[in-house]
């Protein structure tokens, strides 16, 4: 049989689907990109048995049918449809019989898959070559059990369920999934066991991570499964400090989503009419988890990728019953979270360079300005059922705690990020203007009544937002450590994964008011006794929580800066506002200053070989320096220009 065209080199290197043109001319993708001259095909041996490769679903067809699993669903099929729809996922899991999706059933299915694989002729597998499989990429039953224990909570859940993927289908088809996806899921499972009582070996987790990367370099799939792979690989890379790999995974996932048109809702995609409702929802959730990750990067990274990537054409996640709930509940909260994250990112980029004058900065937060209207519109559009409201910004009362627990229980979702971002967006919007209160040239008597009121409003807005951020942070930490009022299945709703960046924003505001704000503004704002024991105790508690989360990758520079700010606040309380009377020779010059940055780590390299880049944060210090003699500086592109702005106007 003559050889047949397989893929052009560009599509093969980019892990993209290749559709040759008429008469073996340039493929559709190269024509679309204007690269017809670089479209060179490679010859490949024809397959003995035809296969299908669905780029939309990521399923690789073979002549061997995937074994199906018979589930004991009689109890549910006999129930009324209305009663089924009223059950949430946790109630389903509590009521589901152990035989519905138990370990014994899965073990039997896995054994059937092994037996069928042994009995099926090799030619029926549809392999493109007769090369032996790399032992490091082969799937084992131990791998399957590792992922099963993760998704089923060590067998305590009758039905394995996950937030962003169809866990049941993943386990059924585990042996047919791309090796890269299988291995990175094992890595995620090991990480989950590390944070539980079943501690895993870090070397084993690192081994799975390296094997997943190796499998990826050999992968030739362009499918929704690879989006799932990019997401988990990016998380693992971020956790071990390989931030460049994490960012590259995000870029690759976004490009793949755009290429596969996953940014269009599956219900509005006629070419996906063959997918089942649960497959469509999984595809929708793959988009949302990448879009959430992208929105976070936009909000705190100086090198966020710029794509025409938004959620305008896709619906929020929803539940699918088949007949039991297929996914962990995710509400339309994600829509508001990503909106606020993108607003924070927009404000961050707008403040890359300082304004031309103090007057322009004083007018930046005036009513009816674009940013002010955008922020006000976003805040007012969020439903109050998602908001954790309390009267005193500095204190959450026991009655408030009871109300919050009830809200979280009814929402069946994580309310932490939304409520923290609500306050963070306010703080980053007003903080540049608040920093004017640290300049002697901007003493209240030198400003017009309009600008004086604007600065005073900025101080109050930032301070209230910071008190609320720290109060919510302490409340969620308390709930995570255990509380009798919370059901064990609802502890997951009290996660605060991105709380470090939000706590850092509040820390900067507290530090500035305690150590940098001019005394006239302190008096005008009623903050003459601000640096008291209650403030310092609050700062110490927040710092200890952040430090307990570990110092890896993006959190390391934040910890260094928080420790320096806390030390300066405590020294100021003992010695008074001593920095005002420092002689000129005590001020550290540029050569002696310590610059805090984020180290990019590489697996298998020494720390000295790693480069230092701009740290992750929402806004940074805008040129402000920390410590006695201002010897500690925050690394960042905008920092030097803002530092010059303060000197010229100080």
Image (cartoon, rainbow, N blue to C red):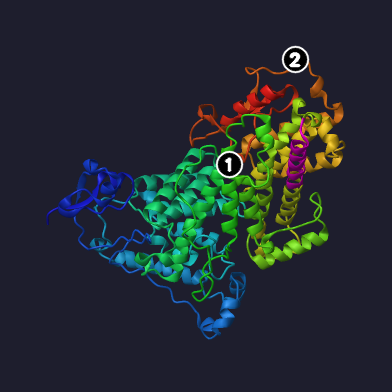
Looking at the rendered structure, the secondary structure element under dot 2 is helix
Residue 310 at x, y = what percent? Answer: 48, 53
| Disc 2 target residue | 584
Position above or below: 531 against 334: above
Distance from Cα at disc 1 to Cα at disc 2: 35 Å
- The structure residue drawn at horizontal position 23% and vertical position 44%, both measured from the top left corner, is 36
Determine if residue 602 is in view.
yes
Tags 1 and 2 touching, CB below 8 Å: no
Report the residue at 27% width, 47% height from top.
30
Which picture quadrant has residue 431? top right
Is 126 covered by the magenta stretch? no
* Picture layout, residue 347 above or below residue 95: above
Left or right of residue 345, residue 218 in this image: left
What SS does tag 1 mark? helix
Q: Position of residue 347 (x, y in %)?
A: 60, 42
Which numbered disc covers residue 638? none
Q: Give the main secondary structure of the magenta stretch.
A: helix
Tell me the magenta residue range: 447-465
Circle 1 crowding by C-alpha within 10 Å: few under 14, some 14–19, many from 20: many
Q: Position of residue 538 (x, y in %)?
A: 79, 43
- What residue does disc 1 label? 300
512 or 522, which lies in front? Answer: 522
Q: Is residue 596 visible?
A: no
Q: Quadrant of the C terminus?
A: top right
């Amino acid at each position: 049989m003559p050889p047949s065209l397989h893929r052009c080199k560009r599509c093969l290197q980019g892990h993209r689907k290749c559709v040759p043109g008429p008469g073996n001319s340039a493929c559709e993708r190269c024509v679309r990109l204007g690269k017809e001259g670089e479209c060179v095909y490679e010859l490949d041996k024809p397959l003995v048995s035809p296969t299908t490769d669905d780029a939309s679903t990521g399923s690789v067809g073979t002549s061997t049918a995937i074994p199906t699993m018979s589930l004991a669903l009689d109890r549910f099929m006999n129930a009324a449809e209305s009663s089924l729809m009223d059950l949430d996922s946790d109630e389903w899991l509590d009521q589901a019989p152990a035989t519905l999706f138990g370990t014994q059933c899965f073990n039997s299915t896995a054994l059937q898959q092994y037996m069928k694989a042994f009995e099926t002729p090799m030619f029926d597998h549809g392999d493109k070559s007769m090369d032996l499989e790399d032992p490091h990429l082969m799937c084992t039953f131990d791998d399957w059990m590792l992922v099963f224990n993760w998704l089923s909570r060590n067998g305590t859940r009758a039905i394995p369920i996950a937030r962003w993927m169809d866990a049941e289908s993943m386990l059924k088809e585990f042996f047919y999934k791309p090796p890269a996806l299988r291995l990175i899921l094992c890595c995620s499972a090991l990480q989950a066991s590390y944070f539980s009582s079943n501690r895993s070996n870090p070397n084993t987790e690192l081994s799975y991570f390296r094997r997943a990367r190796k499998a990826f370099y050999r992968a030739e799939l362009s499918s929704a499964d690879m989006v799932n792979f990019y997401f988990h690989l990016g998380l693992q890379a971020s956790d071990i400090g390989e931030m460049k790999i994490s960012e590259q995974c995000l870029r690759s996932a976004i490009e793949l989503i755009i290429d596969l048109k996953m940014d269009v809702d599956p219900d509005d995609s006629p070419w996906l009419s063959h997918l089942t409702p649960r497959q469509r929802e999984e595809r929708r959730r793959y988009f949302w988890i990448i879009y959430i990750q992208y929105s976070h990067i936009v909000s705190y990274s100086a090198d966020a990728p710029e794509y025409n990537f938004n959620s305008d054409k896709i619906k929020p996640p929803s539940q699918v019953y088949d007949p039991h709930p297929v996914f962990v509940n995710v509400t339309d909260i994600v829509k508001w979270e990503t909106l606020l994250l993108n607003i924070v990112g927009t404000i961050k980029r707008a403040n890359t360079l300082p304004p031309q004058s103090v007057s322009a900065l004083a007018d930046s937060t005036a009513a009816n300005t674009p940013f002010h209207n955008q922020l006000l519109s976003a805040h007012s559009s969020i439903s109050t059922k998602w908001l954790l409201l309390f009267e005193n910004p500095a204190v959450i009362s026991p009655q408030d705690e009871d109300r919050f627990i009830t809200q979280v229980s009814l929402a069946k979702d994580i309310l932490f990020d939304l409520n923290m971002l609500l306050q963070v967006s306010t703080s980053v919007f007003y903080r540049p203007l608040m920093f004017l209160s640290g300049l002697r040239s901007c003493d209240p008597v030198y400003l017009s009544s309009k600008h004086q009121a604007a600065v005073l409003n900025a101080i109050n807005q930032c301070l209230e937002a910071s008190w609320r951020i720290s109060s919510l942070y302490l409340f969620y930490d308390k709930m995570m450590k255990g509380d009798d009022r919370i059901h064990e299945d609802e502890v997951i709703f009290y996660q605060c994964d991105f709380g470090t960046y939000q706590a850092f924003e509040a820390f900067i505001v507290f530090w500035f008011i305690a150590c940098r704000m001019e005394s006239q503004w302190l008096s005008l704002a009623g903050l003459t006794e601000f640096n008291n024991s209650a403030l310092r105790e609050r700062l110490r508690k927040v710092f200890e929580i952040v430090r307990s989360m570990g110092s890896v990758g993006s959190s390391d520079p934040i910890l260094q800066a928080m420790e320096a700010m806390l030390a300066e606040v405590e020294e100021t309380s003992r010695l008074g506002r001593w920095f005002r009377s420092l002689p000129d020779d005590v001020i550290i010059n540029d050569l002696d200053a310590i610059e805090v940055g984020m180290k990019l780590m590489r697996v298998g390299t020494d720390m000295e070989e790693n480069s230092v880049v701009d740290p992750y944060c929402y806004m940074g210090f805008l040129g402000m320096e920390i410590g006695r003699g201002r010897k500690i500086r925050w690394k960042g592109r905008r920092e030097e220009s803002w530092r010059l702005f303060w000197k010229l106007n100080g």
